[in-house]
């Protein structure tokens, strides 16, 4: 969802790449959640294999599956948070939706589509939060920050193969090789995705596909290193991959 930040509209008429992908020209807050879920491999966890534009129906789907929580108690990163601007906790009164990026005391930090006609970060409180749905992510998001630990020596870290993730990034499927074999890109790409998540450049957990959201998250990493233009296109190079592994402490880069 981080990669959707800044998405706007054409002439304020709800038209953008998200609504075009969804196939509906209408309010697009929940379309943004759906778009991000499908482009990160989390459509089953977030959308149950369907597509949602209507926030009430989406919240009800969480409730029907026993994954609905009223108000804000226990809310955490990765939860899908629903709002009623009139302050009720009624699903039928829900107006808007976003995803939780972090929680600081009573402040819930979110990313929301179609807020002021853009996708933006917001800070919300219990007075407008009706409740939240908790997706069953394949790679669960952490509930609380983990205490600092001494990173393992680089020699003990797994290796991300540059040639493999480059081919995955250039593939229409976001993958290279045969799943479950040594030549598969899934393990390498998942390490890259987890590093981007750890640095706050992605929200949804990765599932080993170097798809559009991973490309966009990697481009943000490249821009943070000072790269511009074609050097910040979201396709890994050895220098940026090496620095990502070192910064995150999750892997070392190889060819």
Image (tube, rainbow, N blue to C red):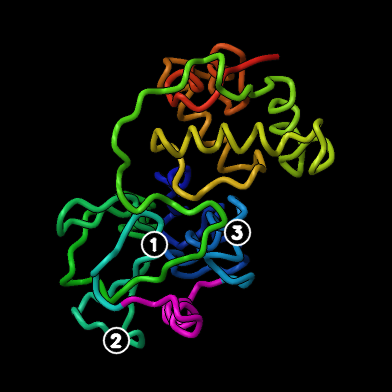
Q: Name the residue under label 3.
A: 20
Q: Is residue 112 magenta?
A: no
Q: Which of marks 2 and 3 is nearer the N terminus?
A: 3
At a point 51% along the width and 48% down the height, the residue shown is 205
Quarter of the rendering containing residue 181: top right
> What numbered label is drawn on residue 79?
1
Q: Distance between the residues labelled 1 and 3?
A: 25 Å
Return the residue nearer the eye: 172 or 178. Answer: 178
Can you say whether 239 is above or below 166 in the image?
above
Magenta range:
52-69
Q: Which residue lies furthest to the top in this view?
A: 239
Can you say whether 156 is above or below 84 in the image?
above
Residue 157, image x and y in percent? Answer: 56, 22
Numbered disc 3: secondary structure: helix
Q: Is residue 255 left or right of residue 29?
A: right
Q: Residues within 10 Å of mark 2 (few under 14, many from 20)?
A: some
Can you say whether 86 is above or below 40 in the image?
below
- On-image quarter of the C terminus: top right
Q: Earlier in the sequence, mark 1 or mark 2?
A: 1
Q: Distance between the residues labelled 2 and 3?
A: 30 Å
Front position among marks 1 and 2: 1
* Contact, mark 1 vs mark 2 (Cβ under 8 Å): no
At a point 61% along the width and 57% down the height, the residue shown is 38
Numbered disc 1: secondary structure: loop
Q: Earlier in the sequence, mark 1 or mark 3?
A: 3
Return the residue nearer the eye: 218 or 73. Answer: 73
Q: How many labels does the image show?
A: 3
Can you say whether 11 is above or below 172 in the image?
below
Numbered disc 2: secondary structure: loop
Residue 178, image x and y in percent? Answer: 84, 40
Q: Mark 2 points at which residue?
A: 90
């Amino acid at each position: 969802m981080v990669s959707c930040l800044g998405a706007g509209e054409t002439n304020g008429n709800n038209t953008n790449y998200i609504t075009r992908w969804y196939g509906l020209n209408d309010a697009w807050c929940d379309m943004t959640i759906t778009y991000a879920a499908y482009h990160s491999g989390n459509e089953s966890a977030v959308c149950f294999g369907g597509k949602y534009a209507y926030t009430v129906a989406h919240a009800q789907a969480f409730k029907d599956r026993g994954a609905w929580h009223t108000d804000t108690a226990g809310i955490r990163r990765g939860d899908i948070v629903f709002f009623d601007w009139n302050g009720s906790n009624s699903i039928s009164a829900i107006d808007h939706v976003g995803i939780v990026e972090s929680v600081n005391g009573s402040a819930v930090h979110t990313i929301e589509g179609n807020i002021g006609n853009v996708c933006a970060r917001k800070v919300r409180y219990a007075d407008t939060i009706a409740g939240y749905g908790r997706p069953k992510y394949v790679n669960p998001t952490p509930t609380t920050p983990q205490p600092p630990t001494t990173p393992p020596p680089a020699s003990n870290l797994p290796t991300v193969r540059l040639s493999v993730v480059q081919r995955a990034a250039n593939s229409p499927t976001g993958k290279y090789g045969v799943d479950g074999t040594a030549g598969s890109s899934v393990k390498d790409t998942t390490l890259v995705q987890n590093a981007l998540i750890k640095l706050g450049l992605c929200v949804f957990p990765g599932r080993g596909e170097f798809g559009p959201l991973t490309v966009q998250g990697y481009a943000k990493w490249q821009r943070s290193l000072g790269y511009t233009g074609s050097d910040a296109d979201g396709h890994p190079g050895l220098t940026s991959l090496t620095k990502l592994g070192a910064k995150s402490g999750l892997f070392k880069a190889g060819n």
